[in-house]
Image (cartoon, rainbow, N blue to C red):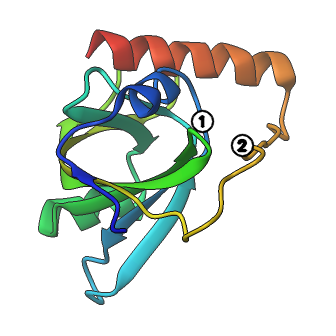
Amino acid sequence: MANKVETSLIEPLYQALQKERFVTVATVDHETGGPNVTSISWVYAPDTERVYFAIDLRSRIVENIKKHPSTVINVIANESTYSIIGNAHLKIEKLDEVPLKLALIEVNISEVRDVMFYGSKISVDPQYEKTYDERAAAKLDQQVLSAMKKA
């Protein structure tokens, strides 16, 4: 049976995107026209219709979405894998109250698809560790999330 295509985040996905988490972002490369995939963790859903993510202003993603706004955010949550499809744009060029030059990208959701292969489920969510100063990482993460929530 085919999975239902949603036009906004289902509640478990919305809840999963209320805090930092591992996701991948796919864009169309502005030079080659091919796929470009990046892993990020600064992601936040202000509501069920949009997803924000923060990325270094020098990231290739910024130029990619300026030329080709089509974007997919891949999220592992709710015992499954989801593709959040939409058009992205640069919402804020530099987030205030964050010491790094981070851009805020807004993705307006057009589709949400459960893309987990048939007959399986995710038994453990992806985990990662910051490899630099733990206190500095926690402070920066809090600054970024706070700035995204204010946007």
Residue shown at 61%/66% (left/top)? 119
* SS for callout 2: loop
Of the residues under marks 2 and 1, which one precedes in the sequence? 1
Q: Quadrant of the N terminus?
A: bottom left
**Residue 145 visible:** yes
Q: Do the residues bearing badges 2 and 1 touch, measured as CB atoms within 8 Å?
A: yes
41 or 102: which is nearer to us? Answer: 41
Q: Nearer the viewer, mark 2 or mark 1?
A: 2
Disc 1: CA contacts within 10 A as few (<14), some (14-19) or many (>=20): many
Inspect the image, locate mark 2, and give the three-letter code of the amino acid beneath it.
Asp
Q: CA distance from mark 2 to mark 1?
A: 10 Å
Disc 2: which residue: 125
Q: Position of residue 126 (x, y in %)?
A: 73, 47
Q: Quadrant of the C terminus?
A: top left
Left or right side of 102 for 130: right
Task: Please tell me how many numbered marks the rendered image carries.
Answer: 2
* SS for callout 1: loop
Disc 2: CA contacts within 10 A as few (<14), some (14-19) or many (>=20): some
Disc 1: which residue: 21
Q: Is residue 82 above or below residue 7?
A: below
Q: Report which quarter residue 54 is drawn in.
A: top left
**Residue 23 visible:** no
Left or right side of 50 for 122: right
